[in-house]
Image (cartoon, rainbow, N blue to C red):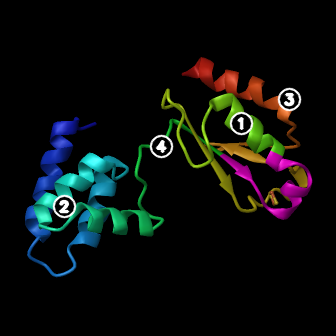
Amino acid sequence: MPDMKEKFDQLQQVIAELKDQPGALMPVLQKAQGIFGCVPMDVQKVIAEGLGVTLSEVYGVATFYAQFTLEPAGKYIISVCMGTACYVKGSQKVLDKLSEELKVPVGKTSADGLFTLNATRCLGACGLAPVMTVNEEVYGRLTPEDIPGIIAKYRELG
Ligand code: FES
C-alpha cells in the first residue's frame, strides 16, 4: 500500500499529464478516486490548485456524480434494504437502530472508521425481509434487537 505522500505524488503526476486537456477535471477526479479510494477536501484542494480552477468547481463536480465519495469508507459497509418487501417488514426500525448503535446518520462512517451505514434498494433477497448486508455477508429476518449483537461481532474483529 503506497503511503499518503506517494499517493499525493501520483496525483501531482496525473494533474501534470492532464492539465492542458480541455475538461481535465473529470478524468483527474476519477484518477484521484482510484488512488485514494475517495476524494476528500485536501485532495480536492490539490486538484483545484493544480488545474487552476476554484475549489467550489471541484467540489461541485465531486458531489454531483455518485461515482465520487468524499470520505473514506469504513472497513465494514452496512447496507440496509429499503425495498418494498423489507420496508413493510420494518427495515426502517433496523436502520434507526444501526444509526443509534453506531452513532452515525445514514451515508456516513462511524468515528472509529469501522462502519459505513447505507440504505439501499432491493437486494434481491426479499424472502428474507428485512435484509441487510455487511460487506458480502447477508443478514435476514432482522429485528432491531439483533443489531447490537451483530455489531459487537464486527467490533471484536476490529
Ligand atoms: S425488498 Fe429487500 S431484499 Fe428485496
Q: Quadrant of residue 76?
A: top right
Q: Amino acid at mark 4?
A: Ala
Q: Nearer the viewer, mark 3 or mark 2?
A: 2
Q: Which residue is mark 2?
A: 48
Extreme residue toward the bottom, this view: 22
Q: Amino acid at mark 3?
A: Glu
For the residue pair 108 and 137, the one nearer the viewer reads as: 108
Q: Which residue is mark 4?
A: 73
Query: Left or right: where does residue 20 sit relative to residue 80?
Result: left
Q: Earlier in the sequence, mark 3 or mark 2?
A: 2
Checking the image for residue 98, the label placed there is 1
Query: Left or right: where does residue 155 sit relative to residue 97?
Result: left
Q: Earlier in the sequence, mark 4 or mark 2?
A: 2
Determine whether the residue tagged by mark 1 lies in a helix, strand or loop: helix
Q: Residue at x 57, y 49 (%)?
A: 107
Q: Earlier in the sequence, mark 1 or mark 2?
A: 2
Q: Residues within 10 Å of mark 1 (few under 14, many from 20)?
A: many
Q: Earlier in the sequence, mark 1 or mark 3?
A: 1
Can you give x and y, in whole percent of width and height, for residue 53 in the image?
17, 68
Q: Which residue is mark 3?
A: 145
Q: Quadrant of residue 144?
A: top right
Segment colored magenta: 79-92
Q: Residue at x 29, y 71 (%)?
A: 26
The image shows residue 55, relative to residue 64, as above or below, that is above
Quarter of the rendering occupied by the N terminus: top left
Q: Residue at x 22, y 37 (%)?
A: 4
Determine whether the residue tagged by mark 3 lies in a helix, strand or loop: helix
Q: Earlier in the sequence, mark 1 or mark 4?
A: 4
Q: Residues within 10 Å of mark 2 (few under 14, many from 20)?
A: some
Ligand 1, image quadrant it occupies: bottom right
Q: CA distance from mark 1 to mark 2?
A: 36 Å
Q: Nearer the viewer, mark 4 or mark 2?
A: 2
